Amino acid sequence: MKNEDKPHLIELPKIHDNRGNLTFIENSRHIPFDIKRVYYLYDVPGGETRGGHAHKNLRQYIIAASGSFDVVLDDGKNRTKFSLNRSYYGLYIPTMTWRELENFSSGSVCLVLASEFYDPTDYYYTYEDFIKAVNENETDQIS
């Protein structure tokens, strides 16, 4: 599996200025896909989790634009936790990766860049369905 196909942190350009820093993202230059959708989560109450799903085709890049939170990823075999707390780097999430967002700090903003337009049929909404699909994909690859 290529590194691009695995979850990993990607540092973004950071232009330092005494008046405040600036970070930017360019399509297919800083992240491995063209951006078709942008959304953000905010005002998440303490103790709440978000996510709790996987995507068949969608890839994402998640940034803690403000504050901090944890992203727990699961590929069907291993679980990994990433703590996001800097606005100049984010987490690349490939297809077929279960994700949960937790431990939101007060006032945090989770910015998500997505490779596809919204499509409700692209989701695995239950972990059981996700694991079943992972196991079917492995069987298909062995055959």
Image (cartoon, rainbow, N blue to C red):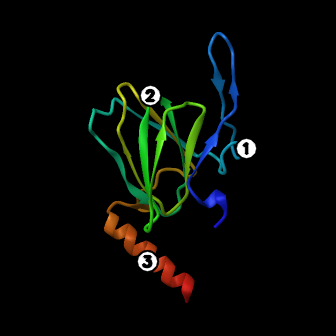
Q: Of helix, strand and loop, which one carries label 3? A: helix
Relative to 123, 34 lies left or right: right
As helix, strand or loop, the secondary structure at mark 1 comes to loop
How far from the left and from the top, in percent, is residue 111? 49, 36
* Disc with the residue nearer the chain's start (3 vs 2): 2
* Amino acid bearing label 3: Asn
Marks 2 and 1, the one that precedes in the sequence: 1
Numbered disc in front, either 1 or 3 = 3
- The answer to which image quadrant residue 124 occupies is bottom left
Name the amino acid, label 2: Gly
**Which residue is pictured at 44% across the width and 68% down the height?**
77
Position of 47 compared to 63: left or right? left
Residues packed near mark 2 inside 10 Å, few (<14), some (14 to 19) or many (20 plus): some
Q: Residues within 10 Å of mark 3 (few under 14, many from 20)?
A: few
Which quarter of the figure has residue 131? Answer: bottom left
Extreme residue in the right direction: 29
Q: Which residue is mark 3?
A: 135
Nearest to the observer: residue 76 or residue 143: 76
Question: In the rendered view, would you say 83 is above or below 125?
Answer: above
Q: CA distance from mark 3 to mark 2?
A: 36 Å
Indicate the amino acid at tag 1: Arg
Q: Gap in Å between the C-alphas at discs 2 and 1?
A: 25 Å
Residue for badge 2: 67
| Frontmost residue, 116 versus 99 | 99
Q: Residue at x 66, y 31 (%)?
A: 24
Q: Where the C terminus falls, by quadrant? A: bottom right
The quarter of the picture where the N terminus appears is bottom right
Mark 1 vs 3, N-terminal side: 1
Q: In the image, residue 122 lies at what x, y percent?
A: 45, 61
User: Picture coordinates of residue 128 (x, y %)?
Assistant: 32, 69
Tag on residue 29?
1
User: Horizontally, is 8 left or right of 17 in the view?
Assistant: left
